[in-house]
Amino acid sequence: MTALRHLVIIGDSYAAWMAAAFLGHSLKALDGRQLTQVSVVATDAPQSRRALSAPPSFRAFNARIGLNEAQLFTAAKALPFYGSQYDGFGDGTGSGAFWRAFGDYGVRLNTAPFHHFLTWQAQQTGMVDIDDYAPAVKLAASGRFTPPVSAMESPLSGVGHGLNLDTAAYRRLLKTASPMVRVIEGTLSGFSRDELGRVSAIQLEGGQTVEADFFIDADGWLTEQRNVPFVAAVGLSHDRAIEVGALHADERAANHITAVDGGFMLRRPVGGEDRIRLVYDSRQIDTDQARNLLGDMGAEAEIETFVQGRRTAFWQDNVLSIGEASGVLDGIGLHELMFVQHELTQFLALFPDQESRPELAREYNRVLTQSFDRTADFARLHYAESGWSESVRQKVSYFRSRGYIQMLDDETASEADFLSLLWGRGIRPERYDRTIDALDKALTLKRLEQMRNIINHEINRLPSFAVLRQQIEQAASGRA
Amino acid sequence: MRENRIQSIIIIGGGTAGWMTAAALSKILGKDYADIRLVESEQIATVGVGEATIPQLNVFNRLLGLDENDFVRQTNGSFKLGIEFVDWARKGDRYFHPFGPYGVDMRGVSFHAYWQKLQTLGVVDSISDYNLMSVAARENRFMRADRSAKNSPIANISYAFHFDASLYAKFLRRFSEAHGVTRVEGKVVDVEQNPENGFVTAIKLENGERLEAELFIDCSGFRGVLIEQVLKTGYNDWSKYLPNNRAWATQCEYHRDENGKTVGFTPFTRATAREAGWQWRIPLQHRIGTGYVFSNNFVDEEKARDTLLQNLDGKYIQEPHLIKFVGGHRKKFWNKNVVAIGLAAGFMEPLESTSIFLIQSGIAKLLQLFPDKDFEPADRDRFNTLSTNEYEYIRDFLVLHFNATERDDTPYWDYCRNIPLPDRLKEKYEVFQSRGRIFREDLELFNDTSWFAVMTGQRMQSRSYDPVVEMLTDEELKARLHDIKDVIYRSSQVMPSQAEFIKRHCASPEFVHG
């Protein structure tokens, strides 16, 4: 095998700079053994100013590129959050108000997944509050905070916080964290192919040519030019977004997702402000209505347009499409940063050399398109049944009939995510796992009560999040 | 919903499958849920080849609340850390497919990649050195995990069991009867069906007795008394992928050395490739179970019997008996109100000890999808889809063992090298060969450790490995791997021999190892 000489990343998006930092660091560590040079062609495409959210596993990505959380707090306007409070997501029944947070529900009492005990408890006693068993929800809802707890016996041990951050600030930080990466600024004007049909170079306005043996498209231009087919995500109709900033409205480490007719409003705290994003279907909400929904702040804001769906292949020949160049969803699942992270780690694991190896691209495409489609399914589950795919229907019918959540490979959502959403939207299992009938009823009820008490007790001892946020924001503004 | 529940269940067949099903249903559903009867005939012998298991059986035993020592003692059982494969890729080769992972993953990259890199540095060593189960197996050592030894490999010892399947069935029979199952002696001679929907409504026994039930579980073995003979479900024949169709099975004594001590009480199953198939060797407390699985298209039955008899540790205790089978599965595992479990559902040769696992998995799925009187078609479909997938995943893993070989010494192995590969398996080969990576499907039983163990054991090569491993320098890599190997070796030395362990905890009266 012959190592790649030159890899070019195209684009100026957060995904482009995540790739640059990630590959730059790998390149440094690889000491030239798999790859000699990485360049970023920073195009002048306009970048939206928006906030994004990431789950606790995002920490691993940042650690790998040498960024710690304190740097993200000060330089990327990051703030921790535990989960999202939904409102208005009922399906005709109930209010559709519920929480989805990072961390599991309860502790297993036998071989049955814990949530079967919720169904059991509901059938035994006529009442159950699922949030009583979710430490992460309790943390978010009560406005408290804890650094990650490692003691296995603590009910908080599985709970971690995710991060909300400002993408413009994060991009700036990533640029400083991309060692050994050459930056070329310019506007794309064309590209050329070699005799095998692989891309050999891109041209910039002004006549500059950049040759490379592999390209990562984080802009979308090259993917579009090469006519990689795009398939729309059936049943997902949102196609516009407006994002504005506002003063913090709440002192909790939590996002708010509120359904409106024809869309949803996502409010998330980042350093110094809340970002409010209205995502909607232009066939149901026109531009004026959308601006009105955001009040005074909406009058000037730019309107983003998009179509939800993905490319049929993310890796074709010697071009890899990542981030919005590979696929776009409406963001209700808060998956964007995690998905780019997933794309980059999979790419590195299947890292190509100069020769064409179709099996690498095939494996990459299998894993990533599947993961994308499962992320889209998680988004579909938020909306009306008419937009559900067959796989969502199956998941729901299995849950409704049996209480089991069928978890597949490469899902970006966790079992707890599905449980929060299914339960929160009023979909309840008719049956629970029969192994529970083998347990002593009184004893089981008592153990459930103890579980609730321990969680409450632990949470009530913790400090409030407001103090921490104040410290983070003061440190950040001190630096700025 | 309560009045809609199934109130009567009949299990047909009292082998391993029948009694495992009876035990699980009676334990989980409890005494008052439904009337459970098991019909078996002493005139019908059970096959009972499935004497070796995989670690998932621990889950089943825990579900029943069995005391492990008691279970091992009563079934003349022993412990199993993995499978040793002899003569598979080439004559003279030996490799171990262990339970539990190799080494430790570092920087988010699987240990396999680091080991692959090490091979390119001219270091000759065995992947087995990085797995405690494999290292312990070499010296016939065994103990259970010591969870208090945090950070030590001793805290994670994965194991399964070997046991006498007929004793296991008896053991589970006592358990089931204590939990309210009624055993009915008799042979099924006639079956009644609902004329409208074809559901089985009752069975008649030789003595004229007529038994009604709402749910029937067919554990009658290859014959498939209800699933095939009555419901004509049909069979997916996998002979083209899995050519073996016969097995001679027997039992023999242990070999003894000049001091009269037994030799070869191994904490693992051995599978030795032969001219037209392979031989299993399952060491129990009192004897060895062994047999030759072969294809009668490549060797005649008498010759195969001779081969088996020439390859015994000690003298045989039981006349070899011939088992005939066709690899594959019923087109539906659950048809109308009949659920097939065990050999009635399908058969795959015991190369990876999956028979008992498939029984257990069938029971687990039945419990998850336990029907009421409506017999929801959606539940039945799901059961069938999940079961079919499970069989296919296992089949592909088995095909790997036969197909990825360099052997060309007999027409049988020539055939095996040219088995038509299912698409999914072909993908797996390609991905492994190019990057040493394992392509894993949803809900697949065998994980990447298993695939890696067998692929490397079968001498399959990959052209390169995950480049992230380059983040360690060659010297760092060698040093880290050396440390891991060292810790594993030292951990193995605190383990007693399997014979000592069993003597201390769970020896049966027939135990013969000192």
Image: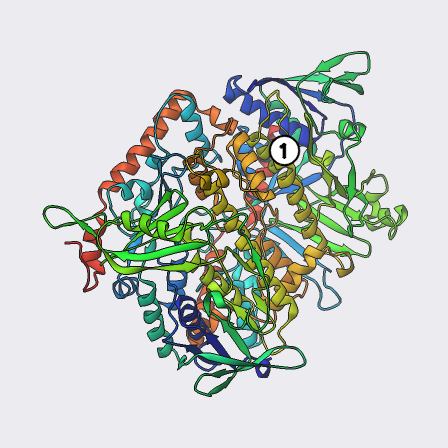
Is A176 above or below relative to B225? above
Is A20 above or below relative to A326? above
Depth order, front residue of B438/B38: B38
Measuring 66% from the left and 39% from the top, which residue is drawn there?
A272
Depth order, front residue of B471/B442: B442
Measuring 61% from the left and 46% from the top, which residue is drawn there?
A412
Depth order, front residue of A233/B227: B227
Is A78 above or below relative to B66? above
The answer for which chain carries disc 1 is A
Task: Give, as a three-letter code, the residue at label 1.
Answer: Ala
Q: Within the image, what quadrant is residue A58 found in? A: top right
In this rendering, position of residue B308 left or right of residue B370: left
x and y percentages locating residue B506 in the rendered image: 23, 61
User: Badge 1 is on which residue?
Assistant: A76
Depth order, front residue of A344/A463: A344
**Quarter holding the C terminus of chain A?**
top right
